[in-house]
């Protein structure tokens, strides 16, 4: 790419703190910008550029705005909503155009454009356009690159519980997203993320900062070659921020397997507090509910909303009636590991495909009677617990992964008649914590109080231990029942049935 140098002499770079001070004050030719944007974050940058255009036309001569096509939204996809930046461009009186068919194919840029700026655009700007523009392209990215590369850095900064974040100004790479040269960046350690931040609040915090850094970078001539990389290298493995898909909004239910009895679950395993945090960031979450009737079994898609986490039974956010009911149930479990009380439960499914990593402790799926045969072999000592979890039979390794894997978990629930909420007991961390779900939507039907949905789709069991519902570690689950003494090594059928049932649940969950 040819570059026409300005007749003004270059100024010497000056010493500066990491990534923020000016290393050139050369402006080059007046900028004729093609601005590609979409959401509220990009609106701040466009407004700042327009203000600079009015104040200093010798720097920014013109601004053209490019947006993606409006997409149908809402139930039935009947409502068409345009991107927010389109209305902002009209208010500012800027030329506005739209990508046909949401692609750059057969789309041609006006010849006078000499700089492309893409902010939260969501489409890769092809090399033919970057080569046509005299100064290539720039991007405002709300992260401390190279960490959190991808289209959703704000989402994953919050999901990963980052304490700091920042903004980077980078060149647009002709090869891939977010791999350009970082020209300016928030000084380390970055901008503190306030506690309990939401996506909206974090956007409101970083968008003005990104807009200001973009205008400052243009004023300082950072867009002029040669470009100098001022990015940092994190001391930890770089995380990515992929698009927030439907899979990311699935509730990550987990259940123990027999291979985790001695080591417990890995510390990274999600639990109810993480689910509440996931809802706080992403909004409504979905899962599958197993609905069993005497004639058939169905898996219904359920969207859960109005979710919060209750730390313990003494929390003021927990209704006293619910607290008393949970405490009473826990006491019954401690007194009798095989409590025969009627426990209302909901059975959930976590679903993944072969492209998603299966948890290391994930047990193989049962194949009809093979599940029971492995349990019997385990009880007789013919195979080890590790072999049972790995699916080893006859010295042959069974496949651990399929095109789709499913993880089933049962959670006892306690309804609140006043608010219509339900409270789920944490079944994988020693029974500690409660997850409150206020609303549910089943298979696209109208949203209803969660207690009403649970009463219709839930069921009851008579075995607390099968759900690992106690406060103590689940090691006692394999202990025999104490309903009557065993004589001469005899094991009554009821004890054997319960023991096998517990083992089956710990290996597979069903």
Image (cartoon, rainbow, N blue to C red):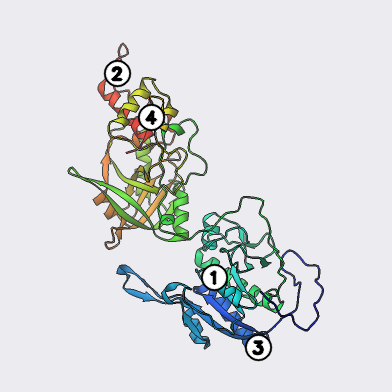
Residue at position x 56%, y 76% in the image: 44
**SS of the residue at dot 3?**
loop
Report the Cα–Cα distance between label 1 and label 3: 28 Å
Q: Are marks 1 and 2 in contact (CB under 8 Å)?
A: no
Number of residues whose C-alpha sits closer than 10 Å to that of mark 3, classed few (under 14), some (14–19) or many (20 or more): some
135 to the left or right of 397:
right
Q: Position of residue 117 (x, y in %)?
A: 58, 75
Q: Position of residue 81 (x, y in %)?
A: 39, 76
Residue at position x 68%, y 62% in the image: 231
Disc 2: which residue: 491
Identify the image quadrant of the C terminus.
top left
Q: Position of residue 476 (x, y in %)?
A: 40, 28
Disc 3: which residue: 57
The disc, 2 or 4, on the residue closer to the chain's N-terminal end is 4
Q: Position of residue 15 (x, y in %)?
A: 81, 67
Question: Is residue 315 visible from the viewing direction of this image?
Answer: no
**SS of the residue at dot 1?**
loop
Disc 1: which residue: 126
Task: Please state which of residues 84 and 369 is positioned toward the viewer in this rendering.
Answer: 369
Q: Are marks 4 and 3 in contact (CB under 8 Å)?
A: no
Q: Is residue 31 above or below residue 337?
A: below
The disc, 4 or 1, on the residue closer to the chain's N-terminal end is 1
**SS of the residue at dot 2?**
loop
The disc, 4 or 3, on the residue closer to the chain's N-terminal end is 3
Task: Please state which of residues 38 and 66 is positioned toward the viewer in this rendering.
Answer: 66
Report the Cα–Cα distance between label 4 and label 1: 60 Å
Q: Is residue 341 above or below residue 253?
A: above
């Amino acid at each position: 790419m040819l570059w026409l140098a300005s007749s003004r002499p270059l100024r010497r770079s000056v010493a500066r703190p990491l990534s923020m001070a000016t290393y050139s004050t050369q402006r080059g030719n007046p900028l004729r910008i093609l601005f590609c944007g979409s959401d509220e974050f990009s609106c701040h940058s466009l407004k700042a550029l327009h203000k600079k255009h009015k104040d200093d036309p010798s720097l920014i001569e013109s601004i053209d705005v490019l947006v993606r096509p409006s997409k149908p939204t809402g139930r039935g996809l009947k409502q068409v909503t345009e991107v927010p930046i389109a209305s902002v461009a009209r208010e500012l009186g800027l030329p506005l155009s739209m990508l046909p068919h949401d692609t750059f194919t057969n789309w041609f840029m006006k010849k006078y454009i000499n700089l492309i700026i893409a902010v939260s655009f969501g489409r890769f700007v092809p090399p033919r356009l970057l080569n046509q523009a005299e100064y290539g392209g720039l991007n405002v990215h709300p992260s401390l690159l190279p960490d959190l590369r991808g289209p959703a850095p704000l989402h994953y900064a919050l999901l990963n519980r980052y304490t700091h974040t920042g903004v980077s100004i980078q060149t647009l790479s002709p090869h891939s997203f977010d791999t350009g040269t970082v020209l300016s960046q928030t000084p380390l350690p970055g901008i503190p993320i306030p506690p309990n931040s939401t996506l909206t609040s974090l956007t409101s915090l970083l968008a003005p900062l990104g807009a200001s850094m973009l205008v400052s970078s243009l004023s300082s001539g950072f867009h002029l070659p040669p470009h100098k990389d001022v990015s940092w290298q994190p001391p930890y493995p770089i995380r990515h921020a992929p698009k927030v898909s439907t899979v990311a909004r699935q509730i990550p239910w987990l259940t123990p397997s027999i291979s985790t009895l001695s080591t417990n679950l890995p510390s990274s395993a999600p639990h109810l507090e993480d689910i509440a945090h996931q809802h706080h960031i992403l909004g409504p979450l979905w899962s599958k509910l197993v609905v069993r009737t005497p004639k058939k079994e169905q898996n219904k898609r359920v969207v859960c909303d109005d979710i919060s986490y209750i730390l313990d039974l003494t929390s003021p956010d927990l209704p006293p009636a619910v607290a008393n009911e949970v405490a009473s149930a826990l006491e019954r479990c401690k007194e009798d590991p095989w409590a025969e009380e009627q426990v209302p439960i909901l059975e959930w499914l976590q679903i993944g495909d072969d492209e998603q990593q299966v948890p290391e402790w994930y047990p193989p799926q049962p194949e009809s009677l093979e599940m029971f045969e492995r349990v019997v072999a385990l009880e007789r000592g013919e195979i080890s617990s590790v072999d049972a979890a790995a699916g080893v039979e006859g010295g042959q390794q069974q496949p651990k992964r399929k095109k789709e894997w499913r993880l089933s978990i049962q959670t006892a629930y306690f309804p609140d008649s006043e608010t219509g909420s339900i409270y789920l007991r944490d079944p994988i961390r020693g029974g500690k914590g409660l997850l409150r779900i206020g609303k549910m939507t089943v298979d696209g039907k109208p949203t209803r109080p969660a207690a009403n949905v649970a009463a219709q789709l839930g069921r009851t069991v008579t075995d607390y231990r099968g759900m690992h519902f106690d406060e103590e570690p689940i090691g006692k689950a394999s202990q025999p029942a104490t309903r009557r003494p065993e004589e001469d090594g005899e094991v009554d059928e009821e004890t054997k049935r319960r023991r096998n049932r517990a083992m089956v649940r710990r290996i597979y969950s069903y």
